[in-house]
Amino acid sequence: MDTITHTVLGAALGEAIAGKKMGKRAMLWGALANNAPDIDVIPGLFQSIPDSLLSHRGFTHSILFAVIVPPVLAWLFQRLYRKKDYGFATWYYIFASGLFVHIFIDALTNYGTGWFEPFNHYRISFNTIFVLDPFYTIALLISFIALLILRFNAPSRKYFVYGGLIISSCYLLFTFFNKRIIDTHFRKTLDVNQVAGNDFITTPTPLNNLLWYNLAKSNDGFFIGYRSICDTKPITEITFVPRNDSLLGDLKNDPGVKKLIRFSQDYYCITKSDSGGINFHDMRFGQIGGWVNPQAAFVFTYHIEENDNNRASINQGRFEAATGEAFKSLIERIKGID
């Protein structure tokens, strides 16, 4: 999830755990604890593109990290603030809740979270919520603003903190319910189109949880479809996109390309670039405007060329940002098809 969401969620948890002991400082420490796993973006600034993709949401987002770090930090902060006598348990609950909630929330998105690092590189992706979903964050943000304004001993603080946590948690349950509906409909769409297998993902389109991007894998390519929770008729149209693996040639064995493939969880396709070389598209992140244009460009693309050492030179492709027209079309498609 985005930094704002982690911040307001962590602040609410800090207030719920230690607000009576620490006052508003509990919100600060809760927010910092909930953002702590994202320290992995710092080494990523000095790494190659494939390495930085894999380092983010890697070890610092693992269960092992969430287990071993909180008691260490709790011991350290208990010593630093021994005059305040907050207690080891209070510090531990703040840091443990922050880390565990962070890695759980991140795993709900489609980026992939390395819960089992460093023992296993498999990444968890429940694909129930977009990485930036204002409908999830809004209740927590209102709670955060109210808690900043209210006096630390105001009786109404508890209503805002628990209200924000309960409403946002209910929204997460709503996203799982939506995903189950979409999965059921997409299986039917695949059956109608005689596409075998259950190797597919469904994930929300940007900024909402009503319109979903559906992606199924076959031996030589992928089938893409879109469905809104508000659709009132069966949607059977899907678009085939060839994988074009052969365009990689010998570069498929390049270490950097292997890391891109690993990061994409094998959901990728290759196209030729107009400027020479090839483009590697991570298809999990969808298309901007794909709900109206099946040929729309994929959001995450990496440009690959073979350098003088017969190694892959990998650069970030142009990020396909949303335009005003794309946003309008998103709203219209969310409304559903009668």
Image (cartoon, helix red, strand yellow):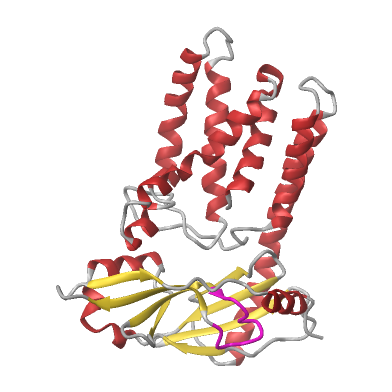
Q: Which residue is depicted at the point 39% across and 59% down?
A: 53
Q: Is residue 144 left or right of residue 97?
A: right
Horizontal arrangement in the rendering, residue 299 relative to residue 143 (left or right) = left
Q: Is residue 209 above or below residue 146?
A: below
Instruction: Looking at this view, name the residue that lies furthest to the top.
Output: 83
Q: Main secondary structure of the magenta part?
A: loop
Q: Which residues are magenta?
A: 286-296
What is the quadrant of residue 148 in the picture? top right
Residue 329 vs residue 140, the one in the foreground: 329
- In the picture, residue 51 is in which quadrant? bottom left
Q: Position of residue 184 (x, y in %)?
A: 65, 75
| Residue at the image position 47 percent from the left and 42 percent from the top | 37
Q: Is residue 269 left or right of residue 332?
A: left
Confirm whether the magenta stretch covers residue 294: yes
Depth check: give the residue in front, 12 or 68: 12
**Image: 298 above or below 163:** below
